[in-house]
Amino acid sequence: MIPWVISPYSFDGSVVRFEKLALLLKRKGLKSVVLADRNFHAAVKFNTIMRKHDLIPVHGLWKDSRIFIARNREEFDSLVRYYNGETDKLENVPVFHESELTPVRYLDVSEKKASIFMRKIFGLDEDVQGFPEKCEDAADALNTEAYDLSVNHRFPTPPKDWNELLIKKAESLGEEYVSRLKRELEVIKRKGFAPYIYTVEKVVEIAKKMDIKVGPGRGSAVGSLVAYLCGITEVDPIKYDLLFERFLNEERQEPPDIDVDVEDRKRKDLIRELSKSFQVYQVSTFGNLTEKSLENLINSVLPDASLEEKNEIYKIVYGLPHHPSVHAAGVVISENPLPLPTRTEENIPITDYDMYDLQEIGVVKIDILGLKTLSFIKDFKKEVFDYSDEKTYHIISKGKTLGVFQLEGLQARKLCRRISPRNMNELSTLLALNRPGPLRSGLDVMFSNPKNVPAFFRKMFPETRGVLIYQEQIMRLAMFAGLSGTEADILRRAIAKKEREKMEPLLEKMKKGLHEKGMENAEQILEILLNFSSYAFNKSHSVAYAHITYQTAYLKAHHFEEFFKLYFAYNSSDTGKIFLAVQELRNEGYRVHPPDINISGKDLTFHGKDVYLPLTVVKGLGTTLVEQIEKIRPISSVRDLQEKVIGVPRNVIENLIIAGAFDGLYENRKLALEELNKKVEKDILEIRSLFGEKVEQESSNVKIGDITELEEKSMGFPLTPVLEVPTGLFACIADVFTYGRILPVLVKRVSRNIVTDGLSVCRVSTDIPDGVHLVLLSPLQKIIKIWPFNENTRFVYRVDFTATLEKAGQNEITEVLKNGAVVRYEGYRPLTDEYRYRVVPR
């Protein structure tokens, strides 16, 4: 009997791992084995591992209770065509009924329970078998041979005048551009990468013809002048001092990597359009059994198993594939059809192979990523931006960055205030620093206060005040010391991967070159290089993404109301973001009202300084129901809505009421709820009377309770403030959440864990006593400290340097140490997040 291995990629309960299988075959003295899945997801992995162990991989296909075996590459391609539905019959290919082979789903008895568990989670029976003790060698029995699975992937060829057209574009920019372009083209030609770059150029060109917004570029490709002149990127690499060698150099063996960002809602349209001109394939990916999902599955499927059994099963199946999916970005574009196993979704084939398998067999993917932010920017219909606008840099520098690309997080807002960018270079630096490594190592502090940075670095890298922040700076330093651009990139990668054999000779060459340039402190320079290189970021990517960051900030600064309308539309289901948006609107002086059944629709509604939330923020209200409501307005009562829109669930109407949507029609929300309940009771009475039932009618027992808690139930956040709190004395709740700062706020307890400052309201993680209190409030909704309040209470900030100050509440005071003396500024607070404080009576 010939063993027939089923892989985990058949999603059939197998726990066979190929490395372990190879070792088992060698122990048994076998030189081959059959793999036959219901698909070809595992074919390349199986082929690669078996051949690595000098074994013969025998490929098959399991279909309709039969096993088809490919003895050579020609038969394998026939199997693929049959699998793809390109042919309905196979000739001269060995075929077995599945009962004639021994199906193998595990390799030793310790794995049997794990295989049964996997069968259960796929809804299959518990019939599993392991590798037989005695069996035939598949290659001997079937006369099969080993073969590779590589395919001939050809990108479209650039036209003959491609280089000349690029040179003409460079000539219009100046001699420096022509020289740089010719150098890049020479490397691209020698490496044979022109077709790849030309293909990406066509992708971008087709996208723009379809009026699809394309990003300014991403990754190291932004450092290529060729990419810039092709229109692939929009960032001038010479203007921003970007390195082509970071993207491509003589030593690079793999193809270059150019990723394209497009507006997310049009990505599928673009792929369909590309398929009219080229052979286009999407790429498979797999959802694996991760720690959390696996623990939940084991506990639900095997609740009675012992802890030891659960742990054993966990170890065996952890990381195995659970389901196939489609790669979010990867697309294969080819001039010629490729002999790849595929499935089809929306008329676009999806390769059975994942991105790693495709790379193994010589197929190069291009990443086309759908970016929601590009769709957001596109909606403003603004193409040209002034990248020196002071108002834009002002809101970034204050950390007022809700909705600003890559700067919404609290750590990012703090960094915005520290760096306070005034131009695109500093904004790019901010993005590069906004990562855990640089922040942990204090690079942001060094950048904002570079007095301890060696003079050599400050002189060489003035754009980052001498702080090594970018990978390109490491390369620049290496090139300054005499290394070629290629050597500089090899050193960069060797340092990042800690490859000492590659690193040490290049560092030695650097040290020698620095000594030759008169640098007596060469060892110190190299030490600084090594200390900070692990945190270095790709400058090309950072500069490109800084343009997207700036564009979103510019739109917010100059089109505030339109910005927030779109922000609500894009984030209507995210109650956390909607809450923050409400706070910022209040910070700007807008009066934010609940959704109104006769005013609100799908979008935020501005009436001067009065803002009405959209109906879509109410739980259970989708756009279809909102459109129905808009068509039948005006609505005069709860009953009117029920009669005009048949079938609206009672709980949805209740959510509308307690959110405040009927406030304009009723004196209070309790009255509206009572009308809803009367209508429900009346309907029930009528229905039951048809069946002769006698029903005692009860009066409504609905209690309105606390408005803010009901709002939180219906919308996900409290909205209506309580007015009996003195205002203007300290910061506001809205300030805390708008700027992401820890600030002193005067609040009153509304209900358990909900507080108000008279202008806004929020839930906090701890309860406070009744009455009015001064609290130190965090944007994480935590009260850090609480003080009793009277009219003499003052909050005093203390800073030990000349800090930028901003207007604050009347009872906030900043003390600044100047020339050994303390200067007090009443009604001001420091813009920095680094301050000491005390609370004192006046």
Image: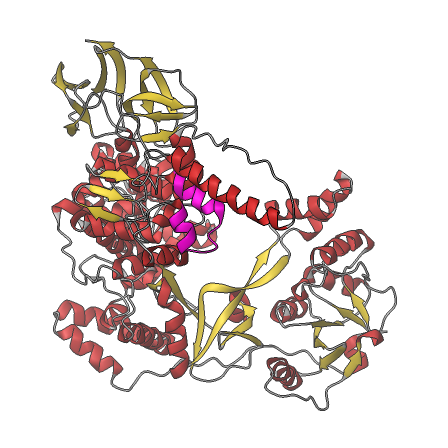
- Residue 129 falls in which quadrant of the image? bottom right
Q: Quick check: is 515 in the magenta stretch?
A: no
User: Residue lying farthest bottom?
Assistant: 91
Give 416 or 595, whichever is nearer the viewer: 595
**Colour mapping:** secondary structure
Q: Is 831 on the left or on the right of 332, as rendered?
A: left
Q: Identify whether 176 is placed above or below 648.
A: below
User: How far across and down, in percent of the image, does residue 145 sit?
Assistant: 70, 81
Locate the C terminus and report the quarter of the image it occupies.
top left
Question: Does the segment drawn in magenta span residue 652?
Answer: yes
- In front: 824, or 503? 824
**Compared with residue 13, is residue 801 higher up or lower down, i.e. above or below?**
above
Percent position (x, y) of residue 196? 37, 75
| Residue segment shown in magenta | 639-658
Q: Residue furthest right?
A: 134
Quarter assignment of residue 97: bottom right
Answer with the quarter of the image where residue 771 lies: top left
Magenta part, dominant SS: helix
Q: Is residue 487 left or right of residue 289?
A: left
